[in-house]
Image (cartoon, rainbow, N blue to C red):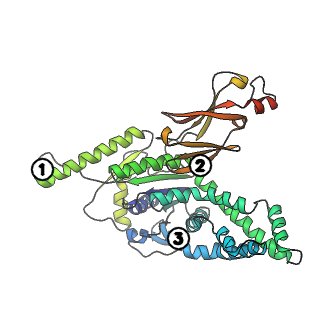
Amino acid sequence: MRVVLVAGKGGVGKTTLAAAVAAAFAATGRKTLVVSTDRAHSLGDALGISLGAAPSEVDAGLSASQVDTRALVAGAWDGLRAHLGTLLAGAGVDELVAEELTVLPGLEELVALSEVDRMARSGLWDVVVVDCAPTAESLRLLALPEAAATYLERLFPTHRRLVRGMLAGLAGAGASASRWDAAADAIGRLVERLDSLRALVADQRTTSLRLVLTPERVVAAETRRAVTTLTLQGIRVDGLVANRLVPALDPADAGPAASWLRTRRAEQDAVLAGLRADLPDLPLCTVTHRAHEPVGPASLLELAGELAGSGPDPLLDPGGGAAQRPLLSVERGAGAGVDAEYLLRLAVPLIDAGEVALARVGDELAVTAAGHRRLVPLPSVLRRCVLSSAATDADGLVVRFRPDPALWLRTGEQTGSE
């Protein structure tokens, strides 16, 4: 099973390209589902059919659906939320505060991704292509499983025994045990769904993301930031698709229109050259701007033909191409014992040291870059160290650590052994 997430800035043709990629996968004989989590829900327009929440067959081997977030929210959370509000109010928490505490951040996006996870794990399809919301919403969406799990862990302990004990304490001796057991089970199931989502998004063997853009400087700048953020989140970006490239003109063509098109194409070529220079490890393919709008499986399959190129192309085979380097790696620097230096490398492209904020949070390193924050678990040797400096190089961010003498010597590391 493969999951291909298709994202990009609003208006770049993301939905059309997601549908085209899905049509191409289906044409290779793989049972494919394309599903939209974009609130605009224009996937049906691109396919030329009316879509609902249940998958509909579009063509041979190709099905499609649009996630109905309102119905999912009503079924997945509203009942539990009301129950938790009652518990908190019964424990003496102000009613308005209790109401705020039971608002799960990004709930609609979370249940949409959860539905994608359910479909992907159903075993009915070989490939699931996801038409994501515009880039900013997608970045928030893909970070939600981890953020929401952290929120729930702080609001209610995830360990089932602790949950039951806490709920029983809130309920009082006269309450029905089965009622609190049911609440504990509901919380446990929600946490399990979040764990499943985190595993799906972070599994680079089965899940990858491709970014759609138009060859414009503003869009390319957002694409660069998205690659940085997605890599920091541990999500594999497997390629870029530049849509609406102006066709090349014959040298003999003349006139104002030809001059305008040549100028536009030259600007687009410059933007693409900059992306290729900045992201040399990412495949980048182009799709020509067409005079007619591609609607329906046949037109979409024709459009997808430009993605295939010659020979195996990772943009059509999400299992192709080399997997990204591990996000984290640790190197031993100069010195020994308490005078040693350790380097934590984060393989994040295009990261700007001047815009990175680092903070130690217990045994984790909080990294904020491109407007997004990620808690990175520290390897055991670095948990006994203090952060000394950070810088960037061609491979990403390099964070330097030095042993904390108090912790280092307390654990018997006088010789500097690990």
Tell me residue 91's x, y (percent).
79, 72
Q: On screen, 341 above or below 191?
A: above
| Residue type at the position of mark 2 | Arg
Sequence-wise first label, 1 or 2: 1
Residue 67 numbered mark, or none: 3
The answer to whether residue 226 of the structure is visible from this angle is yes
Closer to us: mark 3 or mark 2?
2
Q: Earlier in the sequence, mark 1 or mark 3?
A: 3
The three-letter amino acid code for the residue at tag 3 is Val
Secondary structure at numbered mark 3? loop
Q: CA distance from mark 3 to mark 2?
A: 27 Å
Along the line of sight, the residue nearer the viewer: 33 or 392: 392
SS for dot 1? loop
Give the residue type that dot 1 points to.
Asp
Which residue bears the numbered disc 1? 253
Q: Position of residue 240 (x, y in %)?
A: 41, 49
Q: In the structure shown, which secondary structural element does the residue marked by tag 2 occupy?
A: strand
Q: Which mark, by number, is residue 394?
A: none
Q: Mark 1–mark 3 contact, CB under 8 Å?
A: no
**CA separation, marks 1 and 2?**
52 Å
Residue 78 image point, x, y percent = 65, 75
| Marks 3 and 2, the one that precedes in the sequence | 3
Q: Is residue 89 above or below residue 162?
A: below
Q: Which residue is mark 2?
A: 374
What residue lies at 55% left-to-right and 43% top-to-bottom?
357
Contact (CB < 8 A) between labels 3 and 2?
Answer: no
